[in-house]
Each structure stands twice: as structure tokens, then as C-alpha cells.
């Protein structure tokens, strides 16, 4: 009789858990054309101001989180990748990949109030409240730079095992960062600025986006082979993997909802993963979004997801390539232009000596035109980038009726 009662209670409990589980029905709530110029990368949600910060190659757009309307702009952030917010200090920070520094701005006025040096090509950037430091993760120098968030002064550099991608802080003094080139996860002591551990992530190729359930010490890393790897933050052991879409680049987690998200720009999906328990995770929904919507921001309280994208095509792809390889391509175009110019002048000189012989004169003229094209392109590189900027850049807001 006792066994029957036990199994009856177990069945009722299981049924109750299923009935009380949070259902998801994420759908498009609003699409807003926001315009402006520049390719895009990371975005972040500001819960205090209910704003969305979006990096746009040379500046940062600030949008209203409810209407999508443009509220302001932070200029002069050349090659900006990411944005970090320190609300208790009233400051924000951007990682500027082209000029290898951090812009510090006032959260209320959005005005730049300082700069700090970083390593080469800073990409991801986060604020760690435990140490009150900002960390940039530098893809060009395979290291991380720590900046004191209050003074704006560099605090130190941490060598890393390979090219870093995104990072997350646990709020207790440890910062975790994906090492994309090594398929691994590195744990950093944010106070001593030393590496605590390097953990391999088997089954995770090209880890990019990273987020964390701080209460249950679970890390969510999205991987290029279409899985989300879930890692124990204390041991570094793989808890499990769940399938996600193609081309993921960002991961977020809502502690109130117990939901992890992956934005997959390759196939245009948003994967919603429910934390059934700290050791069990279920894909709750794969939402059809649009190709290119690879980075996102999350309002952790309401579960609202923000995505940005533009119509994919050759022009957009070319603009991303030119932006990513700016530091290499711009000087290369100038050097190539000068070499072609010298070669064209030599051919034209020979043609003149031979009574303007047709073949050297023809080739000299072609090379002269090409040299001018490359030199002018190098000189007007940013103008070309702006001309290639997406014309229909937009913000999409995704909500679940059951999340609020």
C-alpha cells in the first residue's frame, strides 16, 4: 500500500511538473527599421534605462527597448565590437577593434568621458562587478586586458591560450572566456588577473557566444557545429549538449525563466533551451527569425529577446569582410596601388622610347588606372564601407506571452 501511494505521489508530482513547466511561444512582437550606417556586431540590453545598445562599426546606436526608436548615438568608436555596462558606476564601455582601445562613456548622457588602451583588436568586452574591472578580449594578440572601471586606468594583461571569443563573469571573481581557436574554455581570476584553468570542450567546435546560470553554476557555450555545450563552472566538466541552429554567435540566459537562448544567423533561428534541472536541459522551441540575425540582447526579467539584421547579399557580405580585415586591407590596397603605379610609369616610359609601342602603352595605361583605383580606395576606405552599409538595417523584438 505504501509503495502504491509512493508511486501515485510520484506520478502526480511528475504530471504537476509538466503542467507547471513554462511553455514557450516566442513570436515577433515588433520590427523596427533603424537605419544609420555600418555593419553590426554585439548588442546589449540596459535594464535600468530600458535601452538596447547596438555596435555599428564606427559608432554605437542606442535604441528604446519598447518602441525601437533611436535615442542617441556614441560616435568615434572605430571598429567597435562590444559594449559593457557598469550601472552602479554610471558608465559604459566599448571595445574598438581598429584603434585598439576602449571608449568610456556616461550612461545618462551617452557622452564619451575617457579612453583606455587595450590589446590588439579587442573584440568581446564585459564588466565584472566583483573586481570592478572591465575586460577586453583581444583577438589580434590572444590576450585579455583589464581596465579599472572607476579610474579608467589599465590594470593588467592576461595571456590566453588562443584567440578569445565571448566571455561572462560569475559575479564572484571569476571570468570565463571561450577560446575559439582551441575549442576550450578559460577561467580567469578577475582580482589576481591570472588563469585559473583551461578546460577542453569535447564536441564543441568553434565556441563563440557565452552566458551563465550563476545560481546553479552552469555555463552555456554555443558552438559552430550546431550544439550548445553546457559546462559545470566549478569543475569544467561537460554536463550535456543540446542541438541548436546553424551559425550561432550569441548566447544569453534568463534566471527568472530558467531559459537559455542561442541566436543562429546561419539558418535564421532562435533556439530556446529550458533548464529542467541543473543537469537536464530541453530544447523548448526553435523560432524562425531571419538569416543574419546572429547576435542578440535579452531583457532577463521579461524574457524579451532583441535581434538585429539586414537583407543578406553580396554587398552586405563584402561590407563585413572589409570591416573585419580593415587593418590589413587598407594598407595593402595602398601598397598595391603604389607598386602598380610605379610599374605603369615604367611601361609608359618604355612605350614612349619605342614611339608609343602599342603593347607596353596599353598595359601601362591599364595598370595606371588600376593603381589609381587602389590608391583612391585606400584613401576613401571608410567612405566605401559606408556606401556598402545595409540600407534596411532593423531591430526585431521577440516575446513570449507566457514569459511576462
Image (tube, rainbow, N blue to C red):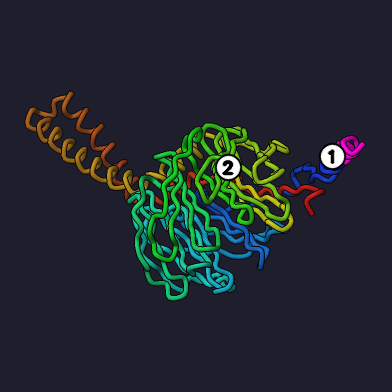
Is the C-beta separation of discs 1 and 2 under 8 Å?
A: no
- Pointer 2 local density, CA inside 10 Å: few below 14, some 14–19, many at least 20: many
Numbered badge on residue 147: none
Q: Secondary structure at mark 2?
A: strand
Q: Which residue is mark 2?
A: 230
View extreme (top): residue: 359
Q: Is residue 5 found inside the magenta-colored segment of the image? A: yes
**Most extreme residue toward the right, as rendered?**
1
Q: Check disc 1: other Cα within 10 Å, few if <14, some if 14-19, many if 20+.
A: few
Measuring 60% from the left and 61% from the top, which residue is drawn there? 62
Q: Is residue 156 left or right of residue 232?
A: left
The residue at the point 21 percent across, 28 percent down is: 363
Q: Does residue 33 appear in this view?
A: no
Residue topped by disc 1: 10
Location of the N terminus (image quadrant): top right
Of label 1 and label 2, which has the lower sequence position?
Answer: 1
Chain part drawn in magenta: 1-9
239 w.r.t. 399: above or below: above
Quadrant placement of the C terminus: bottom right
Residue 343 in percent (x, y) is at: 16, 36
User: Picture coordinates of residue 183 (x, y %)?
Assistant: 44, 39
Q: Main secondary structure of the magenta part?
A: helix
Name the one closer to the observer, 340 or 329: 329
- Quarter of image, res 222: top right
Assess whether residue 103 is covered by the magenta stretch. no
For image coordinates 54% across by 74% down, the residue present is 89
Answer left or right for 160 relative to 251: left
- Residue closest to the eye, 246 or 78: 246
Question: Is residue 30 found left or right of 4 in the rendered image?
Answer: left
Determine whether, in the image, residue 269 is placed left or right of residue 163: right
Amino acid at each position: 500500500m505504501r509503495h502504491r501511494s509512493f508511486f501515485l505521489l510520484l506520478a502526480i508530482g511528475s504530471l504537476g511538473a509538466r503542467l507547471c513547466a513554462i511553455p514557450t511561444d516566442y513570436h515577433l512582437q515588433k520590427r523596427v527599421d533603424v537605419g544609420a550606417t555600418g555593419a553590426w556586431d554585439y548588442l546589449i540590453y540596459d535594464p535600468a534605462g530600458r535601452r538596447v545598445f547596438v555596435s555599428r562599426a564606427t559608432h554605437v546606436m542606442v535604441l528604446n527597448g519598447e518602441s525601437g526608436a533611436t535615442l542617441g548615438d556614441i560616435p568615434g568608436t572605430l571598429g567597435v565590437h562590444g559594449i559593457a555596462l557598469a550601472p552602479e558606476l554610471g558608465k559604459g564601455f566599448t571595445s574598438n577593434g581598429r584603434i585598439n582601445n576602449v571608449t568610456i562613456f556616461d550612461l545618462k548622457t551617452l557622452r564619451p568621458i575617457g579612453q583606455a588602451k587595450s590589446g590588439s583588436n579587442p573584440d568581446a568586452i564585459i564588466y565584472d562587478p566583483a573586481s570592478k574591472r572591465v575586460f577586453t578580449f583581444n583577438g589580434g594578440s590572444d590576450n585579455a586586458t583589464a581596465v579599472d572601471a572607476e579610474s579608467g586606468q589599465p590594470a593588467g594583461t592576461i595571456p590566453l591560450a588562443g584567440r578569445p571569443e565571448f566571455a561572462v563573469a560569475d559575479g564572484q571573481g571569476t571570468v570565463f572566456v571561450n577560446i575559439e581557436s582551441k575549442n576550450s574554455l578559460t577561467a580567469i581570476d578577475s582580482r589576481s588577473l591570472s588563469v585559473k584553468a583551461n578546460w577542453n570542450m569535447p564536441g564543441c567546435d568553434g565556441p563563440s557566444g557565452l552566458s551563465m546560470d550563476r545560481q546553479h553554476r552552469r555555463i552555456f557555450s554555443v558552438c559552430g557545429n550546431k550544439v550548445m555545450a553546457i559546462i559545470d563552472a566549478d569543475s569544467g566538466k561537460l554536463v550535456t549538449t543540446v542541438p541548436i541552429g546553424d551559425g550561432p554567435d550569441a548566447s544569453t540566459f534568463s534566471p527568472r525563466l530558467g531559459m537559455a537562448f542561442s541566436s543562429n544567423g546561419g539558418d535564421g533561428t532562435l533556439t530556446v533551451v529550458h533548464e529542467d534541472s541543473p543537469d537536464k536541459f530541453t530544447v523548448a522551441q526553435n523560432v524562425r527569425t531571419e538569416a543574419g540575425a546572429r547576435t542578440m540582447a535579452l531583457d532577463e526579467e521579461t524574457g524579451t529577446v532583441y535581434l538585429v539584421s539586414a537583407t543578406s547579399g553580396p554587398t552586405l557580405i563584402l561590407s563585413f569582410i572589409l570591416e573585419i580585415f580593415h587593418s590589413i586591407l587598407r594598407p595593402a590596397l595602398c601598397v598595391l596601388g603604389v607598386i602598380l603605379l610605379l610599374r605603369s610609369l615604367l611601361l609608359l616610359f618604355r612605350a614612349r622610347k619605342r614611339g608609343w609601342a602599342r603593347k607596353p602603352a596599353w598595359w601601362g595605361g591599364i595598370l595606371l588606372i588600376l593603381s589609381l583605383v587602389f590608391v583612391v580606395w585606400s584613401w576613401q576606405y571608410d567612405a566605401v564601407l559606408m556606401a556598402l552599409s545595409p540600407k534596411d538595417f532593423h531591430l526585431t523584438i521577440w516575446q513570449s506571452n507566457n514569459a511576462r
